[in-house]
């Protein structure tokens, strides 16, 4: 979908562990930062889209999550839309907010993602992920793993899934094994992704993990589920990120400096594929490229959904950053590191920045906005002009249940 909304301000709290901090406080802190960045008072907001995935499981808060968080700040009267869409919750909130601004319904709106996943009962934290599948399927998440194992020609073993680790790591492991058989990838290639993102994350003061890891250290780490070691798996975390969006008319009135325009955004859900190369991510990317009138070669940087290290490698291909089967070469050539042809996950990605699922989508927009405005510090991509955000969520069949892809561009309004 073609868009015409502008990012006026962004804010994000460092991702990490906030056991003693209320969920609504995390949201409030990120929103205040975004409002200050935009130079806008909270009373100017005309509507809000609030993305959260797991509060019902972790804190017990259901139904009015956004109203609760905003009322704590003294924000009321305006329309508040609660968005729950698995890991794509706040990217969906962002996409819908952009659509309403682009359509002319509002001039100043908020998109926010916020999440707490840490809990004293680890099984409850992991259970939040187990609900991001068709739970009315008698075998639930296990059946997703079985289908993927059959597709990969691998034995079906899920011992510990959902109790000692997120069941999604088993899902990603099976996807990885299929990719390994198709294209000759090895565990070392996945370690290259994790090491690269640890380098990027070491430069990001808001990243959950700042330690830089070598490829050998990634390979030597504790095995979670073959072939994934701990640094190849995105961690659970807490955090919040917020984006203030304005219309072009309001952007001109405000005299925005270094304005960033949302040129296109696509929200796509899964379907029963007719061709083995079809995917939710590929369709969303194709729609965005067509709507914006650009191609993947025009991109300056990408924030993508590296919930596991293999996920990033596979996403290179369905986002068309390279032809099918050439993701390994793109990685080995250093093209996706800072200073490379197309830097990917300069924030550290989900692997190092962290993955408080409901906050992830807006956090990607924060990173891209700062890159396009030239304020990303040590991880700045030189001359960044166009950025792409890719965020998937849930699992049904052999792919994500939902994916959002958005394209941002630096624009001169003079």
Image (spheres, rainbow, N blue to C red):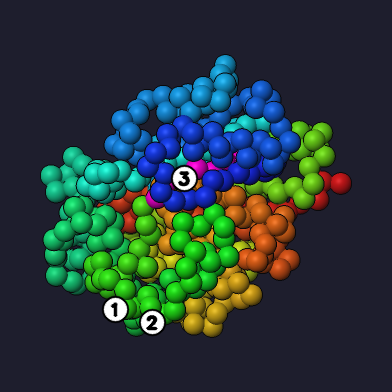
Which residue is located at x 36 percent, y 52 percent? 236
Picture layout, residue 154 above or below residue 113:
below
Picture layout, residue 64 above or below residue 412:
above
Bounds of the magenta span?
A: 237-245
Crowding at dot 1, Cα within 10 Å, few <14 / some 14-19 / many 20+, comes out as few
Q: Quadrant of residue 220?
A: bottom left
Crowding at dot 2, Cα within 10 Å, few <14 / some 14-19 / many 20+, comes out as few
Dot 2: element: helix
For label 1, the residue is 181
Numbered circle sitting on residue 216:
2
Please report whichever mark, 1 or 3, sits nearer to the chain's N-terminal start.
1
| Location of residue 244 in the rendering, given as x and y in whole percent from the top left corner | 64, 38
Q: Is residue 14 magenta?
A: no
Marks 2/1: CA distance? Answer: 22 Å
Please report whichever mark, 2 or 3, sits nearer to the chain's N-terminal start.
2
Which residue is located at x 17 percent, y 44 percent? 137
Name the one closer to the observer, 136 or 246. 246
| Location of residue 54 in the rendering, given as x and y in whole percent from the top left corner | 35, 39
**Residue projecting furthest to the front:** 20
Dot 1: element: helix
| Front of the two marks 2 and 1 | 2
Please report whichever mark, 2 or 1, sits nearer to the chain's N-terminal start.
1
* 378 relative position to 156: left or right: right
Q: Quadrant of residue 380?
A: bottom right
| Location of residue 23 in the rendering, given as x and y in whole percent from the top left corner | 43, 35
Q: Main secondary structure of the magenta part?
A: strand
Name the one closer to the observer, 159 or 151. 159
């Amino acid at each position: 979908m073609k868009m015409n909304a502008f990012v006026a301000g962004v804010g994000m709290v460092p991702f990490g562990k906030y056991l003693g901090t209320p969920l609504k406080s995390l949201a409030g802190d990120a929103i205040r930062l975004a409002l200050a960045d935009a130079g806008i008072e909270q009373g100017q907001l005309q509507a809000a889209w609030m993305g959260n995935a797991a509060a019902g499981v972790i804190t017990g808060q259901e139904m009015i999550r956004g109203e609760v968080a905003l009322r704590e700040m003294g924000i009321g009267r305006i329309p508040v839309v609660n968005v729950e869409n698995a890991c794509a919750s706040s990217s969906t909130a962002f996409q819908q907010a952009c659509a309403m601004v682009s359509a002319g319904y509002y001039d100043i709106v908020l998109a926010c993602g916020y999440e707490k996943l840490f809990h004293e009962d680890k099984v409850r934290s992991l259970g939040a992920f187990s609900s991001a599948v068709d739970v009315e399927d008698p075998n639930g998440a296990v059946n997703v793993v079985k289908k993927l194992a059959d597709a990969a020609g691998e034995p079906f073993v899920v011992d510990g899934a959902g109790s000692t680790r997120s069941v999604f790591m088993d899902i990603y492991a099976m996807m990885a094994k299929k990719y390994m058989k198709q294209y000759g990838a090895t565990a070392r290639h996945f370690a290259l992704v994790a090491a690269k993102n640890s380098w990027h994350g070491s430069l990001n003061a808001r990243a959950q993990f700042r330690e830089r890891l070598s490829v050998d250290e990634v390979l030597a780490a504790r095995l979670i589920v073959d072939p994934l070691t701990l640094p190849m798996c995105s961690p659970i975390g807490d955090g919040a990120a917020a984006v203030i969006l304005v219309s072009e008319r309001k952007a001109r009135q405000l005299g925005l400096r270094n304005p960033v325009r949302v040129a296109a955004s696509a929200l796509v859900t899964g379907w029963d594929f007719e061709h083995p190369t079809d995917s939710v991510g590929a369709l969303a990317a194709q729609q965005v490229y067509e709507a914006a009138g650009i191609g993947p070669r025009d991109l300056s940087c990408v924030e993508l959904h590296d919930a596991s290290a293999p996920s990033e490698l596979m996403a290179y291909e369905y986002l068309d950053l390279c032809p099918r089967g050439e993701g390994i070469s793109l990685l080995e050539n250093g093209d996706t590191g800072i200073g490379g042809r197309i830097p990917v996950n300069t924030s550290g990605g989900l692997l190092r920045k962290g993955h408080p699922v409901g906050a992830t989508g807006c956090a990607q927009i924060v990173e891209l906005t700062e890159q396009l405005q030239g304020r990303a510090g040590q991880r700045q991509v030189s001359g960044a002009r166009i950025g792409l955000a890719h965020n998937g969520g849930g699992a049904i069949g052999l792919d994500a249940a939902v994916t959002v892809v958005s394209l941002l561009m630096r624009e001169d309004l003079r």
